[in-house]
Structures are given as C-alpha cells and as structure tokens.
Amino acid sequence: MRRKWTKKKTAILAASYLTAALLALGFWAWTGHSRLADYRLAAKYSSGRAFDETVRSVEALSQALAKSVYAADAGMCGRICSEAYANALAAETALSTLPFSTQELEQISAFLNVAGDYAYTLGYESAREGFSQEQLENLTELSASAAEFSDLLRQLQAGVGEGSVVMDSREVRLNNVDGQPEGTELLSARLAAYEQSFRAPAELKYDGLYGKEEQTSQWKYEKGELKQLAADCAGVKPEELTLKYSYEGEEGLVCYAAGDTLICVSPAGVVSMSQSRLVGESLLDPDQALEAAETFLAEQGFEDLELKDSRVSGALALLHFARVEDGAVCLDNCVSVTVALDDGSIYAFNAADYDPKASGAQWTLSQEQAEEKLPASLTLNESRKVLICSEGGRSFACYELRCSDGEKQVLLYIDAADGSQRRIEVPEPAGET
C-alpha cells in the first residue's frame, strides 16, 4: 500500500512540475512575442524616420543649390555653401541608415558626396569673392540632379504612405519567399532601378577631395628598374626578392618581400618599407636613431628634409620629416622613418605623402605684414614660412603664427597671397589624448 501511494505522489508531483513549466514557458513566449512586437514597431518607426530624413535632406540640398544663381554678394554665397554642405552630409548619413544595403547605390552616394564636398570647398572662396561663372554653372547642374532625385524621393514617400511602396525589413524579406504582395514594390528595388538611370554631373574640376586635377608626374625610374630599386632599399640581391603583388597602370605600385621585410616601389621611387620581426631591447638613444634615419634618407635620394617631430614607442623611434622649399617647411609633404633601437636598422619607412616637385608658391606678403593679422586676443610666440596643402592637393604659401591664449596654444596660418586665414589649429595640451 505504501509503495502505491509513493508512485501516486510521484505522478502528482511530476504533473505539477510539468504544469508549472508549461505555464512558465507560455508566459515567457507571451512576453517574448510582446517584446518582438515592440521591436518591430520600433524598427518600423526608425526606418520611417530615416527615410523621411533622407527626403527632407535631399530636398533641402536641392533648394540650397537652386538659390545659388540668385546670390548677389559674397556673404550670401558663403551661407548657401554652408547650407548645401550640411544637407548633403545629412542626406548621405540618413541614406546609409535605411534598412537595406545601400552599397549598390554607388552613383547616388557619389553624387551626394561630391555635391557636399564641392559646396564645402567653395565656401572659403565664395565668402570673399562670390561665385564665378564656372562655379554657377556647376552649381546649376548639381541643383538639377538634386531636384530630380528629390522628386523621386517625394513620390516614394507618397507611395509608402498609401501602401504601394513597402519599406524594407528582415521580416518583409522572409515573407518575400512566396513573392512580393501584389501591387506593391520594395523601396530598395525602386531606388536600385533609379540608380541604373541616374547620371551624376560630369566630373568637376575644383580644389577639393573629389576634384583633384590630374598632375604631370616626374618619374625617376623605369618599370624594369623597380626590382633593383627594392633590392637596394632592402640591402639584398634582386634574386632574393619575392613578388607579392602589383598594380597595372602608369603609376603601378609593385611590392616585394625579402624575408621579414616588405618593400613597395613605384616609378616615383621607394614608397614604403616595413619589417615584421620582433625588436629586442633598446640599445640606442634618440640622437643615434636620428642619425640612422638621416643616413637612410640620404641613401634613398631624399634631399631638403627637416625633422618635423619624433617620439619613442617601446624599442622603436618614430621620426617624421617634412620637405623644405626655399626656406619654407612643407607641412603636408612628409616622409616617416621608424628606427629599431636594438640594432639601428630601419624598421619602417613611408613616403606616400611625399612629392619632390616644386610648388611654385609665392610670398606676396612679408612676415611682418602677416603678423599684423594676429587677433588682439592672441600673443605671438614665433612665426615661420610654411606650405600647406588643400584637400585637392594644391599648395598654399602661408605664414605659421604660433600663438598663445593664456595656457592654450593656437596655430594660425595666414595666406601669403592675400593675408586671409587659411587654417586654424588648436593643439591639445601635452599629456592629453
């Protein structure tokens, strides 16, 4: 009798536990479903907001560019450029947050980038002189493309509102296994179709990031000499080199390996070199590292260089050199050398930002005239002649005014042609990152 009662009790307990587990599972499933519904609503709301922001930004870009033909003074031209740049940036950001991949929208994204960069670049010039006829023609062409894209987005926005255009989501993609609901189109499909027919304005020639004009390069080496050049740089025989990769074209880069050293060369010379070995204990001081770097640069044919800055990181000394032209330091025309402090060998070298050609820049203003442009709130510590580069690679002759505003350090770059402020930098205090 006792044994039967025990079995019955066990069955009751098992049933109780199972019931409790089913109840807990049901509650968990209900909670999860409720949360999933909330997530879906949040995702749908976020996607809608991103698309609405894209529509508004492109429309504002179109309107800003359209106003350029009516601007009659330099101040208004500068303001229009600011509006266009801000809206192009906002449109590109909003477009990238839509709930589908926008990598295939290459033409549209490129247009927004170019339009924003062109407006940003013109902002400096137009704020002083207004728009030139060529710039007005370019802005008009950009405005027409922006207006066309804006019209499409407004149509798509109306389609989303009436249900004929469906916003993309993972859930919609899963449902599309059995086909798209009749009478509707995905937003991504409509944009992809428009991308195929969209034609951005012809490449613009301007002094900006996306408008670099082709410059005549002065090659020092033939392609047949590149392997020997790499071998000389690595201190080995040509037959000891292994080809890693190369690029076709006039400016083709060729990379060779020699043991743990990788050397990249081009018709312009040695572009970079790096080692992968583990560096031992530091045995050299910074002065010896500087001497090793200068000797290496001289052997590679680099002339008229000045040490820009240096630092020691572990057992490596990192040195940056800037080219000097007619007594002016070319701040954006540099080479870097890393010296291993265990044996003084060159651990890394990079000349990708180096250009040996003369800029031809002229100094119209004297140094004294440039210093007169200093704001009253700043105290001048020192000044010197420098060359700085724009985003498009154009060199500008400037005077660098190193100033202080209390404990804050300020660098002003005064254009030596007209006395305008070309650049302002506020370095972080030493010890801060």
Image: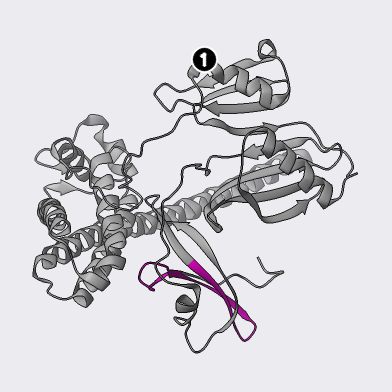
Q: Is residue 51 visible?
A: yes
Q: Which of 177 and 199 is in front in this view?
A: 199
Element on which disc 1 rests: helix
Q: Residue 420 magenta-drawn? A: yes
Q: What stretch is highlighted in magenta?
A: 399-422
Q: Is 401 one of the magenta-colored residues? A: yes
Circle 1: residue type: Gly
In the drawing, does residue 31 fall left or right of residue 13?
A: left
Q: Position of residue 379 (x, y in %)?
A: 58, 85
From the top left corner, tell me how far across and down residue 345 is, in percent.
Answer: 79, 35
Tell me: 212 left or right of 398: left
User: 182 above or below 63?
Assistant: above
**Residue pictured at 45% horizontal, 78% vertical:** 369
Res 162 quadrant in image? bottom left
Relative to 254, say whether 23 is above or below.
Answer: below
To which quarter of the image does residue 76 belong? Answer: bottom left
- Report which residue position mark 1 lands on: 224
Q: Which residue is drawn at 49% across and 26% down?
A: 267
Q: In which quarter of the image is the C terminus?
A: bottom right
Q: Is residue 95 left or right of residue 345?
A: left
Q: Position of residue 260 (x, y in %)?
A: 73, 25
Q: Where is residue 207 drawn, in percent x and y?
A: 32, 53
Q: Residues within 10 Å of mark 1 (few under 14, many from 20)?
A: few
Q: Residue at x 15, y 60 (%)?
A: 62
The N terminus: image quadrant: top right
The image shows a total of numbered marks equal to 1
Q: Is residue 50 visible?
A: no
